[in-house]
Every structure is written in structure tokens, then in C-alpha cells.
Amino acid sequence: MHVAAVPENILETIKEFGPPDIAIAEEDQTWVPFDERASWKPLRFDLSTGMWVVVTRVKGVGVISRHQHTGPVSAYTLQGSWYYPEHDWVARPGTFVFEPPGDVHTLTTDDPEGMTTLFIMNGVMRFLDDKDQLIDQHDCYYYLDQYVRYCRSQGFEPDSRLFH
């Protein structure tokens, strides 16, 4: 089998101008609170595409408001369990979830352990009321701003590797 290689001249350009390889240890990142029971750790903010990667944690039983994503979302459950009442599945450790753009759902955990899940998100997260009226919306740049503000409020600088 022949695998096409990236031409050497293009590789050199990528090495010179592209972002460097990085390895982000989740335990080295700080939890940013949503509220008293839910928080998130950033792992990547791709400012050119608007994609962001976070580990989200809900301590104990809880809900993250009804919302809709304008871009695709991928999730991988690390601990506990969660589900969307609007669907017929439960995500447990090792469960991969794909959410197509436009899906409206309410992240819910009734697990006493709560849940911890890796999310890869694109586009805008639109928070909706019961009548599908827009309440608020967040995107990669909103979460980056929240992260930077939180770090500085705690007396340390944000990890610039997350948004190189």
C-alpha cells in the first residue's frame, strides 16, 4: 500500500509557520465554574475555526440548561453518567456521543456521582427557553474570555498553549 506523503517543501512551510505540537495534561488545567455544581476545564480553543475542547463536570445530580448547537459536537464520557431527556440513551464511561448541528437537548445527570465528559464543540451553543426563544448564546470566544477572566481573578495567567 502506498501512502501519499506531504511534499518536503510543504512540510518545511508547515513547520515554520504552523502551530507547534503540544500536549496538554488535563490535571494541569483549572476548573472554571459554571455554577456551584458544574464546571469545565479547557483543553483547546481553536481561534481560527471556533472549535473548543473542554472537560465538563457536574457534581452529583444536575442539569445544564436546554440548548442547541449550531455545529457538530462530539463527547466521550469519562466518569458517571448523563443523558438528554429528549433522547433514549444514557452515556456512561466509555460512551461516545455525536450530536448533529441543530439538535435541541438538556444535559441531565441523575447519577449521585455526577458526570465528567470530554466535549469537542463547534459553532454556537444557543440556550433556549421552553418555547425555543433564545436566552443566551456562547461560543469558543465566549469560553476563552471566561477562562482568561477566571484565571486572572484567581491571580494567575491563562495557559497560552490552549489557544496558540
Image (cartoon, helix red, strand yellow):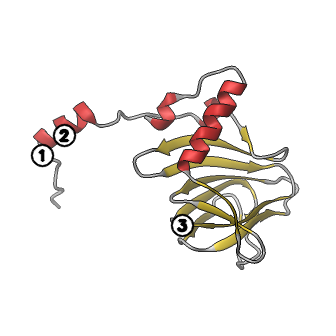
Q: Which residue is mark 1?
A: 7
Q: Secondary structure at mark 1?
A: loop
Q: In the image as oriented, which residue stretches furthest toward the top?
A: 155
C-alpha distance separating marks 1 and 3? 36 Å
Instruction: Give the quadrant of the N terminus.
Output: bottom left
Q: Residue at x 81, y 46 (%)?
A: 35
Could you tell me which residue is drawn at 18 percent across and 40 percent down?
Answer: 11
Which residue is under mark 3?
A: 70
Determine whether label 2 and label 1 are within 8 Å by CB: yes
Q: Residue 29: x and y, percent?
A: 63, 33
SS label for mark 2: helix
Distance of mark 2 from mark 3, alpha carbons?
Answer: 33 Å
Q: Position of residue 106 (x, y in %)?
A: 74, 68
Which mark sits nearer the N-terminus, 2 or 3?
2
In the image, taking residue 29 as reference, residue 49 lies left or right, namely left
How many numbered discs sit on the rendered protein? 3
Q: Nearer the viewer, residue 133 or 78?
A: 133
Return the x and y of residue 155 as percentages of the image width and height: 69, 20
Would residue 142 be found to the left or right of residue 135 on screen? Answer: left
Residue at 51%, 42% in the rendered image: 44
Disc 2 target residue: 11
Mark 2 is surrounded, within 10 Å at the Cα level, by few (under 14), some (14 to 19) or many (20 or more) other residues, namely few
Residue visible at 47% across and 34% down in the picture: 23
Question: Label 1 is placed on what type of residue?
Answer: Pro
What kind of element bears circle 3?
A: loop
Tell which circle, 1 or 3, labels the residue nearer the N-terminal end: 1
Three-letter code for the amino acid on which mark 2 is drawn: Leu
Q: Quadrant of residue 146?
A: top right
The C terminus sits in image quarter = top left
Cα distance in 3D space between marks 2 and 1 = 6 Å
**Residue 160 percent across, percent down from the top left:** 50, 29
Vertical comparison of 42 with 52: above or below: above
